[in-house]
Amino acid sequence: MPREKLSVVVTRRLPEVVETRMSELFEVNLRTADAPMTRAQLVEAVKSADVLVPTLTDEIDAGLIGQAGDRLKLIANYGAGVDHIDVATARQRGILVSNTPGTVTDDTADMTLALILAVTRRIPEGLNLMQSGDWDGFSPTALMGGRISGRRLGILGMGRIGQAVAHRARAFGMQIHYHNRTRVHEATSEELEATYWESLDQMLARMDVVSVNCPSTPSTYHLLNARRLKLMKPTAVVVNTSRGDVVDENALTRMLRAGELAGAGLDVFEHGPQINPRLRELQNVVLLPHMGSATEEGRVEMGEKVLLNIKTFADGHRPPDQVVPGML
């Protein structure tokens, strides 16, 4: 007698190829609207499903997990970051959590370099000038930015993405510096000619560009707070393609408005789409709508990881990308 298929609830629209394969393998409840589930819908999902497939727009907190039915045994997150999931409470309830590490490394690193160039070379200002029809020809002194070759890049978080950023920045001639919980492997450090800073404060004071590439955890919340931002040079630039709450957005906005920082490139925001309106007004800021992982290849690879985690679990084994509290 064939084994009953797992009941899987997906909280957002996924690439069609991923949804199709998931429907072939499992009993799947897919979304028709590309909008986050309401709290009530999430409650219903955790009560009825064997597996929940959420994204970063879903708050899977202790209160929600407490309402889960006996069936829910796996939260297979579509994405690498799991700061929106209470992993500890899930573990206490006997619910496994998995993620999709490594799938967005290159895409996010590419976007980080794009933002560095966009801010330092004033690309959006030039684009706006052209689209408005106000450009009247070449001028030797117009829209002068800065050369990134030779500048010091301070990477906050030297994991997969941080190292990928370092490799790309090195190719552009930037000097690589980093702050991390631990030093990277000696061979990697030598290849990148990277300087390790045990003191984040000391690194920030000396950098021309700071790239935020660390995960969102209780220990990284507002890691770049007002005090630390004030340590930076007024000619420095901040780029964040990680999580918005690592940076104190209000403090950053105040300093940019006051000319105490030269610019910022942000793909993520502290309060999601509720962006500080004063930040939107600034000419020296490039804002993107969380596009770091937005490639067809990356999003499909994320889906393939989700499928592998669920299939492995369905076969009675530990998901290869299981997340446990000690990893956070």
Image (cartoon, helix red, strand yellow):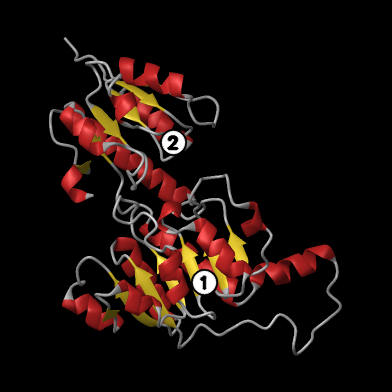
Please tell me which residue lies in front, 114 or 301.
114
Estimate the x, y position of residue 104 in percent, counting from the top left.
38, 54
The amino acid beneath tag 2 is: Val
Question: Within the image, what quadrant is residue 60 found in?
Answer: top left
Q: Which residue is mark 1?
A: 116
Spot the residue most to the top. 1
- Residue appearing at x 66%, y 64% in the figure: 282
The amino acid beneath tag 1 is: Ile
**30 over 317 or under it: above or below:** above
Spot the residue most to the front. 227
Tell how many labels. 2
Report the disc number at residue 131: none
Q: Residues within 10 Å of mark 1 (few under 14, many from 20)?
A: many
Please tell me which residue lies in front, 19 or 83.
83
- Which element type, helix, strand or loop, lies under badge 2? helix
Estimate the x, y position of residue 137 in percent, counting from the top left.
83, 81
Q: Which dot, 1 or 2, sits closer to the camera?
A: 1
Please tell me which residue lies in front, 174 or 234.
234
* Residue 27 is at least partly visible in this image: no
Report the disc number at residue 17: 2
- Residue appearing at x 31%, y 65% in the figure: 157
Estimate the x, y position of residue 266 in percent, counting from the top left.
53, 60
**79 over 128 or under it: above or below:** above
- Residue appearing at x 85%, y 67% in the figure: 133
* Residue 256 is at least partly visible in this image: yes
Disc 1 from disc 2: Cα separation: 33 Å
Q: Residues within 10 Å of mark 2 (few under 14, many from 20)?
A: few
Q: Quadrant of the N terminus?
A: top left
Q: Decide which of tag 1 and tag 2 comes sooner along the chain.
A: 2
Question: Within the image, what quadrant is residue 139 found in?
Answer: bottom right
Question: Within the image, what quadrant is residue 242 found in?
Answer: bottom left
